């Protein structure tokens, strides 16, 4: 462990020397709109960046995931994966032009996940400039169809169709530097849709309002009793409906997640919500529909796992304080298959009311990249092999 820990300060300096390359790759990524199910242009850009950096083997898999492999020195060792999701929650018609200040990059999607993809695109240059070689193949992959209804399809396809064992994985997220995620909660991501039948005149009935119907559903969900152990919660994350202040909308949608350390509790709460939806639909004669988008079982590494301890040691070397939090992203795909994996944040940043004003700081990014390279070296030394 000592050898790669001693090199970590030099990884910071190497990253700084490639500042222009890294920022260029982040901007090139972010300025290509990539809403979920429409990531093709961004995927092709990343593939071209891998090829330009001299990555030996590059391809698009059948689902559209761009993959590049930096060969290791031992064909007998399983590969180490480094991945970042390509899609964003930003609509195509939002301004995607980026600006760069003295210490920030500003633009839509910069925090989720243009920074992660831009760093992924820069890793071949960083590895070459640092003079590093690895025993394992290093598999760099941007994954499509990750967010929302994408339901991690790109990650599931890539891992599910990989022909060899996988040694371990790092998932790159833009924020926050110091993040160390090594477990995923169980969840059910779902939507409740309310659509009222039109009146004979073609207009929604004045006696019912989809927004008020959903409001009744919300009120009843809030009355549910949630266990403190296992930790459980219901997060209502989005709601939409209507177009004008004085017109009853024809429909409305509520998006929410049931989250818990227990899949049994997730399923029990989902059943409670389904009963609420059916009851409100019957009593108000409303067209209510509950749709489950995805279900995920909880999975985790222990804090004592060598990969987690090594990542914490790398952070300590960089004077970063690890912050533990769950991750429901690509991490869950690896952990559910018993592949050691962690999610790391790359820098500090902030979203904004307007997506065009989201920003990340530049100067912390070099420590963020150094930690990724340090953890790659740790994984290559065998911390995932126990």
Image (tube, helix red, strand yellow):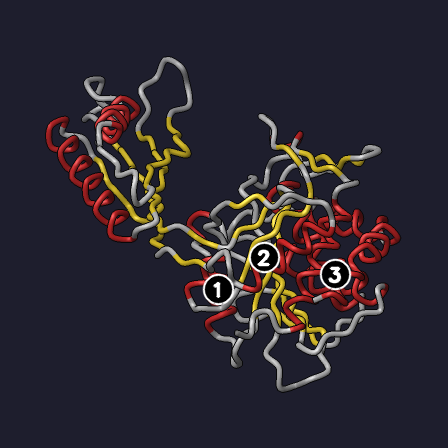
Name the side, left or right, on which 347 lies relative to 125.
Answer: left
Q: Which residue is mark 1?
A: 334
- For mark 2, does the 10 Å Cα neighbourhood hold few (<14), some (14 to 19), or many (20 or more) residues? many
Residue at point 79% right, 65% down? 127
Residue at point 71% right, 52% down? 118
Q: Look at the image and tell me whether residue 333 can be seen.
A: yes
Q: Secondary structure at mark 2?
A: strand
Label 2 and label 3: CA atoms lie apart by 20 Å
In this view, the residue farthest toward the right is 17
Q: Which residue is mark 3?
A: 5
Residue at point 30% right, 24% down? 211
Q: Look at the image and tell me whether residue 198 can be seen.
A: no
- For mark 3, does the 10 Å Cα neighbourhood hold few (<14), some (14 to 19), or many (20 or more) residues? many
Query: Measured along the vertical axis of the image, is residue 75 above or below residue 288?
Result: below
Residue at point 55% right, 52% down? 38
Residue contact at pointers 1 and 2, CB within 8 angstroms? yes
Q: Nearer the viewer, residue 306 or 51?
A: 306
Q: Secondary structure at mark 3?
A: helix
Q: Which residue is mark 2?
A: 171
* x and y, in percent, of residue 313 in the image: 66, 55
* x and y, in percent, of residue 11 in the image: 80, 57
Query: Measured along the vertical axis of the image, is residue 173 above or below residue 241?
Result: below
Q: Nearer the viewer, residue 287 or 305?
A: 305
Along the polypeptide, which appears first: circle 1 or circle 2?
A: 2
Label 1 and label 3: CA atoms lie apart by 25 Å
Q: Which mark is residue 278?
A: none
């Amino acid at each position: 462990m000592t050898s790669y820990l001693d090199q970590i300060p030099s990884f910071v300096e190497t990253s700084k020397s490639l500042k222009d390359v890294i920022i260029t790759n982040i901007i090139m990524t972010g300025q290509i709109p990539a809403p979920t199910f429409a990531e093709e242009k961004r995927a092709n850009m990343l593939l071209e960046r891998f090829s330009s950096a001299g990555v030996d083997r590059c391809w698009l898999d059948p689902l559209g995931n761009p993959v590049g492999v930096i060969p290791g020195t031992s064909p007998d060792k399983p590969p180490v994966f480094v991945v970042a999701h390509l899609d964003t929650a930003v609509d195509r018609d939002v301004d995607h032009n980026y600006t760069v200040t003295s210490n920030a990059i500003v633009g839509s999607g910069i925090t989720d996940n243009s920074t992660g993809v831009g760093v992924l695109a820069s890793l071949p240059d960083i590895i070459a400039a640092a003079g590093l070689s690895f025993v394992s193949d290093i598999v760099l992959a941007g994954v499509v169809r990750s967010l929302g209804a994408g339901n991690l399809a790109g990650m599931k396809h890539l891992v599910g169709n990989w022909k060899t064992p996988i040694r371990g994985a790092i998932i790159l997220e833009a924020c926050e530097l110091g993040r160390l995620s090594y477990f995923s909660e169980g969840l059910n991501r779902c939507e409740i849709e309310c659509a009222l039948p039109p009146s004979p005149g073609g207009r929604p009935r004045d006696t019912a309002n989809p927004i008020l119907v959903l409001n009744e559903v919300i009120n009843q969900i809030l009355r549910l009793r949630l266990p403190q152990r296992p930790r459980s919660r219901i997060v209502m994350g989005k709601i939409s409906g209507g177009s004008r202040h004085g017109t009853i909308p024809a429909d409305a949608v509520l998006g929410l997640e049931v989250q818990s350390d227990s899949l049994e509790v997730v399923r029990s709460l989902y059943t409670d919500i389904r009963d609420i939806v059916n009851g409100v639909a019957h009593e108000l004669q409303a067209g209510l529909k509950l749709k489950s988008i995805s279900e995920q079982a909880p999975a985790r590494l222990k804090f004592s796992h060598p990969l987690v301890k090594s990542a914490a040691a790398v952070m300590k070397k960089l004077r970063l304080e690890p912050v533990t939090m769950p991750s429901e992203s690509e991490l869950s795909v690896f952990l559910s298959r018993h592949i050691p994996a962690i999610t790391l944040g790359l820098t500090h940043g902030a979203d904004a009311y307007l997506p065009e004003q989201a920003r990340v700081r530049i100067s912390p990014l070099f420590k963020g990249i150094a930690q990724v390279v340090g953890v790659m070296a740790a994984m290559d030394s065998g911390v995932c092999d126990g």
